[in-house]
Image: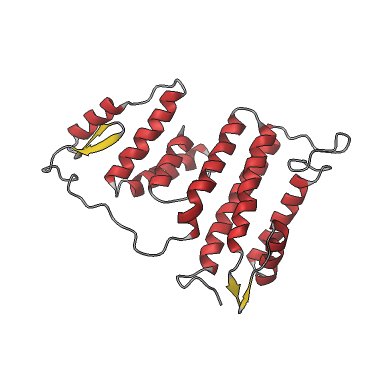
Amino acid sequence: MLEHFKGAFARAAGQSHFRSSSESWAETDLSSAMSQAAENAPLFLEAFYNACEELRGRGLFAPDAAMINVVCEKHKIGYELKPPELLLRDSSSVLATAPVPVVERPPTLAEQAIEILQESLERSERLLAEGHHRAAVQESLWVLESLTTAFRGIEVDGKALQGKYFNDIVRDLKRIGRGSTLERVMEWVTSLHGFLSSPTGAGVRHGVDLNDGVLIGPGEARLFCNLIRSYTAYLLSEHEHLTPVGGRSS
């Protein structure tokens, strides 16, 4: 439940959502995401309402629009939910006249693609919860493979990364990151990708060898998904490092 709401508020704050390592950290991370999302009251309310409605759609109890409106009125929050609209309650409310900030700088990869990647990561999480372990890993692996394509065309030391497919791009990243953390992470990513793809490994891409393959259980699925999430978070930050405002790195 903490992760459910954390994902909603992280998106409202324009951040990536990655699963916390423990319940305690999930609570701390949720509090942080809520605080950042609270800087924009309409987005905060939208995130909370949508998260609640999703739970209600699963047959669970969650506050509805009427309950949320009662809280907003009690604390003089200048908005009222009338689904599908969010309306100004009155012009005298303190927050009713607060301007919505506009992002002026060019959007980063995280801002452009985060919705697509996040939807897939959340789909993976749902598949895990439903016991579809192999499908959950496949969905996560798709995110990792898709994210690497964002590095195509980046220039480093006057030479652009030209790889078209996952293995080619990872090989280029290892080259430009020689002697750094990036090189080591790309080695780990290559090993994980190879194991998950191989029929004698987990076989999530090309089918599993019924004699020598490794069947994925809940423990293995959670491990693989968490590893991929960690690599995804690292690659997002590395992409921003390699692509400054000018769009090229030297």
Residue name at image x 70 percent, y 70 percent: 175
Residue name at image x 72 percent, y 50 percent: 193
Q: Is residue 37 above or below residue 161?
A: above
Q: Is residue 224 left or right of residue 248?
A: right
Q: Position of residue 157 (x, y in %)?
A: 61, 78
Residue name at image x 29 percent, y 28 percent: 65
Q: Position of residue 111 (x, y in %)?
A: 45, 55
Q: Nearer the viewer, residue 84 or 76?
A: 84
Q: Position of residue 104 (x, y in %)?
A: 34, 63
- In the image, farthest residue toward the right: 211
Q: Quadrant of the C terminus?
A: bottom right
Image colouring: secondary structure
Q: Can I make out residue 11 in this image?
A: yes
Q: Position of residue 31 (x, y in %)?
A: 38, 43
Q: Is residue 187 above or below residue 93?
A: below
- In the image, farthest residue toward the left: 92
State which quadrant residue 152 falls in: bottom right
Q: Is residue 65 above or below residue 29?
A: above
State which quadrant residue 223 falls in: top right
Q: Is residue 194 left or right of residue 234?
A: right
